[in-house]
Each structure stands twice: as C-alpha cells, then as structure tokens.
Amino acid sequence: MSCVFCRIVAGEIPGEVIAREPDSVAFLDVQPLADGHTLVVPRAHVGTIEALDDAAADDLFRLVRRLADPVRRAVGAAGTTIGVNNGEATGQTVPHVHVHIVPRWPNDGAGSVHTIFPRNTSRTLADVGAAIRKAIDA
Ligand SMILES: [Zn+2]
C-alpha cells in the first residue's frame, strides 16, 4: 500500500487524526496552509469525487459538515475555506479523495475560491446548462 492517506487511515504511519467515522477519517495536513488545516478522506482508496459511491460520499460530507465549526473554533478562526482538488489536472497530488478544511481569518492574505481562477468562459450559460443537463441524463 503506497498511498499515504491509506497508510494514515490504516495506522501504518502516524497522522494527527482528529475524527474517525465508519467510512471516513479526518487528520491534520502535514504541510498546513494555516493552523487547523484538516483533510477529510474516505477510508476506501478512491481517486475522485465522482468515483465515490453514494454511502461513501454521504459519510465524507457529513464529516466535513460536522468538523467545519469545531476546526474553526479550535484555532479561533473567523471562517473556513472548504475545497477539493478533484483530479490530477486540478493539482490533486495524492490520488485519494480529500476535502480540505482551511481555517481563515480576516486579512489572512488568502483569497476566495474565485481568486484561483482567471475568468475563462466562451459559451453562454444556457448553452452550458443544456450541455450539462444532457450529460447528466447520458
Ligand atoms: Zn489511498
């Protein structure tokens, strides 16, 4: 087993684990962007959000919801940014789904999720909406 998150979940390597659920585990990022930077992962080695089954997705996001406030309060933060790099092309470096919970403070030097994207659109909302609805049904 070479996946670092699988090894933390299995207890093979140390991790600062903060919560364990039947299908999900949360631990502190070893290279935190801020105090309290937490990763929430499914126990199963699954690479992307879309590859999770319904039960694993429910358990994962239930734990994210449950931890967001305690993580924030524990470090005295004002809010949290919650995000997922979903797939290698997005900068996901460990191919095991992980949801970042990053505590935030006013004027902490970081931006909103919107600040990571240059605005880059070429199609109308109606065109894209129709394409996505068609893809959902496919
Ligand atoms: Zn894994």
Image (spheres, grey):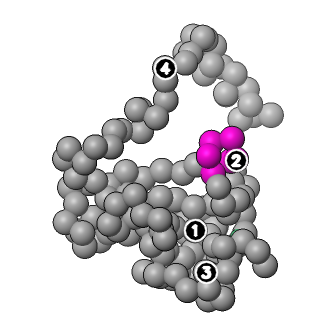
* Amino acid of disc 1: Val
65 horizontally vs 121: left or right: left
Dot 3 corresponds to which residue? 8
Do the numbered discs 1 and 4 sit on residues whose CB atoms are within 8 Å?
Answer: no
- Disc 3 secondary structure class: helix
The amino acid type found where label 2 is placed reads Glu
Query: How far across and down, in percent of the image, does residue 48 sit?
Result: 69, 54
Q: Secondary structure at mark 2?
A: helix
Q: Which residues are magenta?
A: 87-92
Task: Give SS at disc 4.
Answer: loop
What residue is disc 2 on? 88
> Local crowd at mark 1 within 10 Å, few (<14), some, or many (≥20)?
many
User: In the rendered structure, which disc, 1 or 4, sits on the residue that comes first in sequence?
Assistant: 1
Closer to the observer: label 3 or label 1?
3
The alpha-carbon separation of the residues under discs 3 and 1 comes to: 10 Å
Q: Residues within 10 Å of mark 3 (few under 14, many from 20)?
A: some
Q: Tag 3: residue type?
A: Ile
Per the model, the C-alpha gap separating discs 3 and 4 is: 37 Å
State the mark number for residue 72: none
Q: Is mark 2 within 8 Å of ligand 1?
A: no
Q: CA distance from mark 1 to mark 4?
A: 30 Å
Where is mark 1, residue-wise?
A: 41
Q: Could you tell me residue 69's position as x and y percent?
A: 29, 65
Q: Residue at x 62, y 85 (%)?
A: 13
The residue at 20%/44% (across/down) is 107
- Residue 117 vertical position relative to residue 8 in the rendered view, above or below: above
Marks 2 and 1 in Cβ contact (< 8 Å):
no
- For label 1, being within 8 Å of ligand 1 is answered yes
Mark 2 is surrounded, within 10 Å at the Cα level, by few (under 14), some (14 to 19) or many (20 or more) other residues, namely few
- Seen from the viewer's position, the closer of residues 54 and 105 is 105
